[in-house]
Image (cartoon, grey):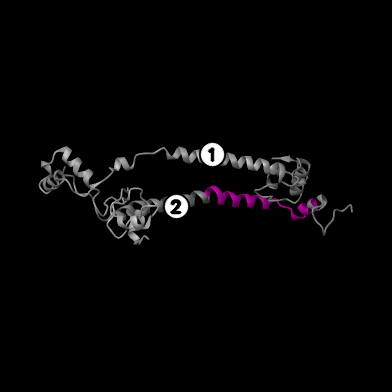
Amino acid sequence: MSLPKPVMRGLLGRRLRFHLPVAFTLALTAAIAFKYTVTEPRKQAYADFYKQYDAVKEFNAMREAGVFQSARPTGE
Amino acid sequence: MLRLTAGRVGSLLTRRATAALSTSSARMASHEVSETVDMSQPLYWDRLDTPLPDRPFKDIVSAADKSLKQKEKGPWSQLTKEEKIALYRLMFCQTYAEMKKPSSEWKTVMGGIFIFLGFTGLVVWWQSIYVYPPRPRTFDPEWQAKQVKRMLDMRVNPVEGFAGKWDYEKGQWK
């Protein structure tokens, strides 16, 4: 019944030395993954949308549909 | 009543706090309904998170116990297995295994949860018949269709969202 004396000190330090690099790596990975799966495609989607965007055409389409109060459809 | 110190509050939660040290004379005099625990004396408890109580479980009274305690002062390798267990039972009421033993309380808890969920369902059903106001017209399918058309006309979220999924040339969803 003579067990070795268990480690009594430095337990928090040991835990931090292991878990902090893991935490930082995971956080960084999550940020990079989000950037390249969400924000970059979204920026590209906006760029592509506005490359072929005709504001006047869209306005006239919306006007004819009757959504504006100040610019009624051309028939009325 | 109870004079509490910060360290003793946890002991209030245990079901095992014995009343052995509460003053019996006070009980006879005041006709207390519940037995009071004298918090100024060292307490015994069975707790998983606080392993060493203030006092041992049993006070050593019999001659056999006294001789066992004397033998405990010597080398422990000379104690038999039964003596070691007897010494443990003098010091503690329950072992960790006995403290951790699972109970069937969860069945009662889940049963109570489901009973009350069921009763709530009945209440909601009754309310839907006798309490709710008439259904708003905005829930009708015709109104919903007109609402969708108006949202598409307004170009709601045309880049990545609602109107972005509608093909305006073909007049259908992409």
- As drawn, B85 above or below A12: above
Q: Which residue has dot 1 on it? A: B114
Residue A60 falls left or right of residue B112: right
Front position in the image: B23 or B142:
B23
Q: Are marks 1 and 2 in contact (CB under 8 Å)?
A: no
Front position in the image: B159 or B18:
B18
Specify the quadrant that holds the C terminus of chain B: top right
Residue A65 falls left or right of residue A38: right
The residues colored magenta run A36-61
The quarter of the picture where residue B93 lies is top left
Three-letter residue code for mark 1: Phe
Taking the magenta stretch, the answer to whether it contains residue A62 is: no
Q: Give the main secondary structure, helix, strand or loop, of the magenta stretch.
A: helix
Chain ID at mark 2: A
Residue A44 falls left or right of residue A3: right
Q: Position of residue B111 (x, y in %)?
A: 50, 38
Q: Pick out the residue farthest to the front.
A: B29
Q: Residue at x 56, y 52 (%)?
A: A39
Specify the quadrant that holds the N terminus of chain B: bottom left
Q: Position of residue B32 (x, y in %)?
A: 38, 55
Q: Position of residue A26 (x, y in %)?
A: 43, 50
Three-letter residue code for mark 2: Ala
10 Å crowding of disc 1: few (<14), some (14-19), many (20+)? few
Residue B107, visible in the rendered structure: yes
Q: From the viewer's perspective, is the residue at label 1 or at label 2 nearer?
A: 1
Q: Residue at x 34, y 58 (%)?
A: B29
Q: Which residue has dot 2 on it? A: A27
Give me the C-alpha separation between circle 1 and circle 2: 40 Å
Chain ID at mark 1: B
Does dot 2 land on a helix, a strand or a loop?
A: helix
